[in-house]
Amino acid sequence: MNRNQGTLLTSIYTILALAITMIFFFPLWWSISNSLRIPKETFTVTGVGIPWVNFTPTLGNWQSQLSTPEAHRALYNSSFIAFASTALAIIVGLPAAYALARFKFYIPPNKDITIWFISQRVLPPAAAVVPFFVIFNMIGLYDTKFGMILVQTTFIMPFVIVIVRQTFIDLPIELEEAAMVDGATHIGAFLRVAVPLSVPAIVAASLIMFTFAWNDYFFVSVLMIKNFTLPIYIAGGVDSRGVQFWFMAVRTMIAITVPLILCLLAQRYIVRGLTLGAVKG
Amino acid sequence: MAGLTLNNLDKFYGKTQVLFNVSLTIEDGEFIVLVGPSGCGKSTLLRMIAGLEDIDKGEILLGEKIINKLAPRDRNVSMVFQNYALYPHLSVAKNISFSLRMRKVEKNVIDQKVKEAAEILGLTNLLTRLPRNLSGGERQRVAMGRAIVREPEVFLFDEPLSNLDAKLRVMMRTKIKEIHHAVKTTTVYVTHDQIEAMTMADKIVVLNEGHIEQVGSPDDLYDRPINSFVASFIGSPSMNQLSGTVVSQKGKKYFQSKNNSLFLLPENSNVKEGQKIIFGFRPEHVDINSSTSEDAIKVKVKVDQPTGSQSLVFVNLGEEELCFDVLKSYSLKPGKEFKMNPQLQHIHTFDIETGKRI
């Protein structure tokens, strides 16, 4: 009797999970569906908008959007800025994380320094944007990719520091000590032992940082004009003629591709159990 | 290869002092064992030699050179850690050759040296494996391979065998000694196991709470412990130690235990009448039912633990417990009464206040 109840319960949970997933997935589905429809059918389609069943799909929207130079520029700028910001955040953030994990600071103490980094993330962007605007104008970084990279790096670096610092703390320090007795400098032990063993955490932090840089609308809207990125480009689907849902849907789909590919690639690198076997037990 | 000299070393963790004025001379090629209870500072001392801990006061010299300020990589020492500390992302071969690659040695020399080290330690078939696919004993041997391949001036071992089962431990002890005989490198070995210390060392340093209690050969420490701590730490089972007073009777000096039993003291003993002392003798230094002794003490067996050819017999002397290591042929079973007297030439006396040998 119990096993039957168990199976019934599992089935109910599964159906419930499926239903909730479909509800949350629906806006994305609607976007995909919209991108394949002619403008007229945006609101007039029946059912849930399944292509070939509820309407005739067309690639017209895709063709027109993908051929515009603006789409290419937005994609290129977004990619360049997000990748460069993530890379810079890692180059600067990993040594910071290591220092906070392994060295003892007194004024201010480690805990305070870490919390200060977190506070960068908590700071409302609106509070920082005016100073950035003024300073960038003064030093000529307004509307440059380089300036935007600096801005993005500032706000995404706390992620890598906080996440990877904890990973470094959890690494047995004997491994780095063994490396130093074996002839490595402290930096050598950091690069050859600590970093390779923290790759899963670094990849996870990088994904998060990349996504934040990729998705940023606020800073780009204030500090960029010609060098706009995908979020601005998507918002540009609203003009005097009204909201062009079909174009916005296509642009959104374009904007999803790069992070999606990265996530699929990164799955292979987040491998558990890298440190099993190094230390006894 | 060189000798090590430690001069007046102090070490503090914050406000707590963990090493007090430690001085030690280690000859070139010597196998010296630092032994003591947990927390006595032996690992800290080893790490200071390696350069992994700062020195608050005093000097460490390798040969003639003061190495206080040198980074670990510049000290030409190699270390085997208690939990092996193998690089988990590198194969056995890469683990062993790590130090040679750090020093930019040529590839064919590296391959040759790794091959030699692997042969000595029986690792030739495991060179491509990752640490997580090795047994405990195999990991231990890789850790040792990593240490010996570099031919350093000093080997440092930090309780390397404490995570192995008993049989492996005995095997590895022999292996380590074999390697030491072959390469004659100065070795500093830390352990809390006094049997390991006794079987492996040329010289033993007994540490307690940051102080050196005694330095000497295993025989020195066993036969002439300098104080009651060393006497009870070295030797298994531990030396019997009773507290009491010295009394005089019939012109001879006796030790009177808490339950008023009288133990004859040797004639050349320096104790004075009325002095409060600790009376010690090792479990095997006792005569059973000896017909020649008139000062034998009658006791009753509480528990016996046969250990093969011998038997450990436990008796109560008043409230205190004594242990004797005797031949099984005496058949001392629980409840049986017998007479015992400690062998006069193997009696140890210590001052009750200071614990020092009298």
Image: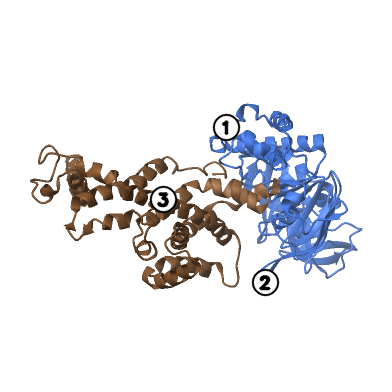
Q: Secondary structure at mark 2?
A: loop
- Badge 3 vs badge 1, beta-carbon distance below 8 Å: no
Instruction: Report the residue marked by disc 3.
Output: A207
Instruction: Report the residue marked by disc 1.
Output: B129
Q: Give the alpha-carbon distance from disc 3 to disc 1, as whole Å.
A: 31 Å
Inspect the image, locate mark 1, and give the three-letter code of the amino acid beneath it: Arg
Which chain corresponds to the colour brown?
A
As drawn, A232 above or below B313: below
Number of other residues with Cα within 10 Å of mark 3, as a class: few under 14, some 14 to 19, many 20 or more: some
- Name the one closer to the observer, A232 or A264: A232
- Name the one closer to the observer, A42 or A138: A138
Q: Is residue A252 visible?
A: yes
The quarter of the image holding the C terminus of chain B is bottom right
Q: Is residue B226 visible?
A: no
Q: Whole-percent x and y of residue A69?
A: 33, 48
Chain B pictured colour? blue
